[in-house]
Image (cartoon, helix red, strand yellow):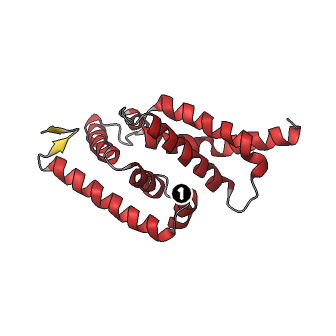
Amino acid sequence: MSDDLEKRISEIYETYYDAIYYFLLYFTNRQEDAEDLTQEVFSRLLKVLPQYDGRVTMKTWLFTIAKYVAIDQYRKRRWQRLFSDNWLARLVTKEGLPEPELELKEEMRHIQQALQKLKPQLRIIVILRYIEEYSVKETAEILSIPETKVRVDCHRGLQSLKKILAQSEEGGMVNGFVK
């Protein structure tokens, strides 16, 4: 590998590692899986970097690779529960008081449980739009779908989340069990 190529890969890795890792962590909600999948994304990057033509940003291109890696992993482990509470560990209370922190973590746990009940395509869109804060255009590029589909699926995903959260608040189902 040439020094220029090695330097370019190092720069890309340093620039985008965290963003790719957290995207995959939100999707799988398993730290070990996110680490492995992030390495898989950069492994695939090594193979296809010579094909990168600059028509989309490197960030968009990497997230497209990450999307396929995540979907491949989901298909392989469909029967397993993909989410855990690891991502809540990143939440830090500014006040340092245990009650607000506990309430926030409990609220985030409910949202995370609702998020995991979404279909994978809706989950990816909700993560990209509302957690990663990508624009509709960027999300459409990453997912290789029209912007109108992003808007529609975003709306559907949010409506589904609201419905799931309302059911759990009204004494409905939580984790498949009646409250």
Q: Quadrant of the N terminus?
A: top right
Left or right, 92 with reference to 163? right
Q: Position of residue 53 (x, y in %)?
A: 76, 58
Extreme residue toward the bottom, this view: 148
Q: Residue at x 20, y 41 (%)?
A: 174
- Which residue type carries mark 1? Leu
Q: Nearer the viewer, residue 10 or 172?
A: 172
Question: Is 176 left, or right, of 47 in this rendering?
Answer: left
Depth order, front residue of 94/156: 156
Judge whether residue 19 can be spotted in this image. Answer: no
**Residue 108, percent from left and from top:** 32, 44
Residue 170 coordinates in the image, percent (x, y): 12, 50
x 73%, y 40%: residue: 47
Q: Residue at x 51, y 45 (%)?
A: 23
Task: Please give the name of the residue rendered at 41% of the width and 48% of the height, measured from the top-left corner.
Answer: 120
Point out residue 101 in the picture as x, y percentages from the top left corner.
31, 39
Q: Is residue 2 above or below residue 133?
A: above
- How packed is label 1: few (under 14 Cα within 10 Å), some, or many (20 or more)? many
Q: Which residue is mark 1?
A: 143
